[in-house]
Structures are given as C-alpha cells and as structure tokens.
Image (cartoon, grey):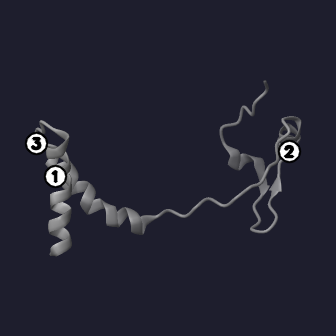
Amino acid sequence: MSHNPRNNPKADVIRSDRNEPVINDDFVAFAEDCSCAVYPVRVRPHKALVENAVKPLYRSVYFNMRMVFFSLDEFNIAIIFPCLISMKG
C-alpha cells in the first residue's frame, strides 16, 4: 500500500487562503489514487487561557506526588483536598 512519504502536510498547501486554499497537484493526485479527499483546515489556536487555569492544579498535584501513597483512596484524597481548599479561599 502506498503512502505519503512527506511528514510536513503544510508543504502540500501551495497558497494559503481562508476560503479556498490551493493544494499541490501531486498530493491531490495521490489522495485520489487512495480514494481520499483533501480538505485543508485551519490549525486550532493555542489554548493559553485553559493552560493557565490548569497550571496551579498541576503544580499542587505534583507537589503532593513527593509523598508515598499506600492506597488509591489516599492518592485521590491528596489530589482532591488541595482543590477543595483553593475553591473555598
């Protein structure tokens, strides 16, 4: 089975256009040969707001990871407890 040896799909877009991007003819022919369609889409934007909201939780969980847990319940409590305290504050 043939495959696209390229590992950079951005190279298959000749001209970027929001409404009608132009795709490399060879790539379109390859896709048709494989009975596939090429539908270029925009890359989703980076979710910095979400990552900044998750960062304090991530840090508090990893801080508690330095402890030794002997059961899953102990582990879950160690993760959930700091979250409950920060929600009250």
Q: Position of residue 67 (x, y in %)?
A: 10, 42
Q: Which residue is label 2 attached to?
A: 28
**Dot 2, crowdedness within 10 Å: few (<14), some or many (≥20)?**
some
Question: Front-most of 31 and 82?
Answer: 82
Label 3 near label 1: C-beta < 8 Å? no
Residue lying furthest front in this view? 73
The percent coordinates of residue 60 (x first, y second) are 19, 56
Tag 1: amino acid: Ile
Camera-side residue of 25 and 56: 56
**Residue found 72% across the figure and 31% down from its top:** 5
Query: Which of the two labelled residues, at mark 3 and mark 2, occupies the earlier sequence position?
Result: 2
Residue 80 percent coordinates (x, y) = 20, 57
- In contact (CB < 8 Å): disc 3 and disc 2: no
Residue 77 tag number? 1
- Residue at figure coordinates x 25%, y 59% from the top left: 57
Select label 2 or label 1 by which is in front: 1
Three-letter amino acid code at the position of disc 2: Val
Dot 2 or dot 1, earlier in sequence: 2
Name the side, left or right, on which 35 lies relative to 5.
right
Foreground pick, 40 / 86: 86
Q: CA distance from mark 1 to mark 3?
A: 12 Å
Q: Quadrant of residue 50?
A: bottom left
